[in-house]
Image (tube, rainbow, N blue to C red):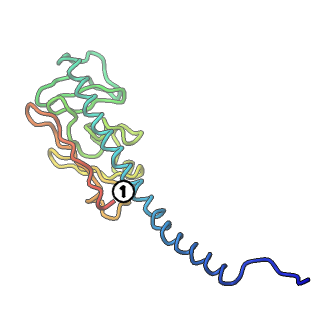
Amino acid sequence: MLNKAKGFTLIELIVVIIILGILAAVALPRFTNLQRDARIAKLNAARGSVAAAAALIHATVLARNNVADTVACAGGGTANNSNGATGTVCTENGIVNLVRAYPDVTAVNGSGILSAAGLTTIFNPTLAQLQAEGYNYTSTATVATFQIQGAPTPASCQFTYTEAPINGAPTISAVTTTGC
């Protein structure tokens, strides 16, 4: 009787290695795309937080019906709860500045939509504190821009919050994710 060796031939091993190589070439780009997916998810979460904060602050002002607070708010000062052109409302963390009963656009370290949205654990975050959480924030007189730090093109990984016009609600743009 002949003793036959059992195992794989060189051709079979090469075919398996080629198949594994093709699978790796297809799967690897998907794994590297997870960072982009994470930035998009963070951007969508920030937008949701801004939208919810604007709605909650507006509801609070309407419920308080222009009646000023008599007790000092956290951090000092009392809120007037005005639904007029400008006003203030007291939250658990401090006073939020308003424009037409919605949070206003303030610079970093100010108490407007940035503070109300709670993107950091600090009520009025500095730019450094905000960036430590992975966000960039800039504002003009009426528009705030929220960006995700670390995006290849931050200007294309963002959304904006525009203060409420007369007899209207603030506008929160759709997220731009082409640069995430």
Which quadrant, please, contains the N terminus? bottom right
Q: Quadrant of residue 77?
A: top left
For label 1, the crowd category at 10 Å Cα-Cα, with few meaning under 14, some 14 to 19 and many 20 or more, is many
Residue that extends furthest to the left in the rendered view of this protein: 166
Q: Which residue is mark 1?
A: 149
Which quadrant, please, contains the C terminus? bottom left
Residue that extends furthest to the front in the rendered view of this protein: 1
Q: Position of residue 131 (x, y in %)?
A: 38, 52
In-front residue for pair 68/9: 9
Kindly identify the amino acid type of the residue bearing the numbered disc 1: Gln
- What residue is at 66 percent from the left and 79 percent from the top? 12
Q: Position of residue 135 (x, y in %)?
A: 35, 51
Compared with 99, 35 (above or below) is below
- Count of numbered marks: 1
Query: For the residue labelled by badge 1, is the local secondary structure a helix, a strand or a loop?
Result: loop
Q: Position of residue 4 (x, y in %)?
A: 84, 81
- What residue is at 23 percent from the left and 17 percent from the top? 64
- What residue is at 57 percent from the left and 78 percent from the top? 18
In-front residue for pair 82/34: 34
- What residue is at 9 percent from the left and 30 percent from the top? 167
Residue that extends furthest to the right in the rendered view of this protein: 1
The reply, left or right, for residue 114 in relation to residue 83 is right
The reply, left or right, for residue 71 in relation to residue 34 is left
Q: Position of residue 95 (x, y in %)?
A: 28, 29
Compared with 164, 13 (above or below) is below
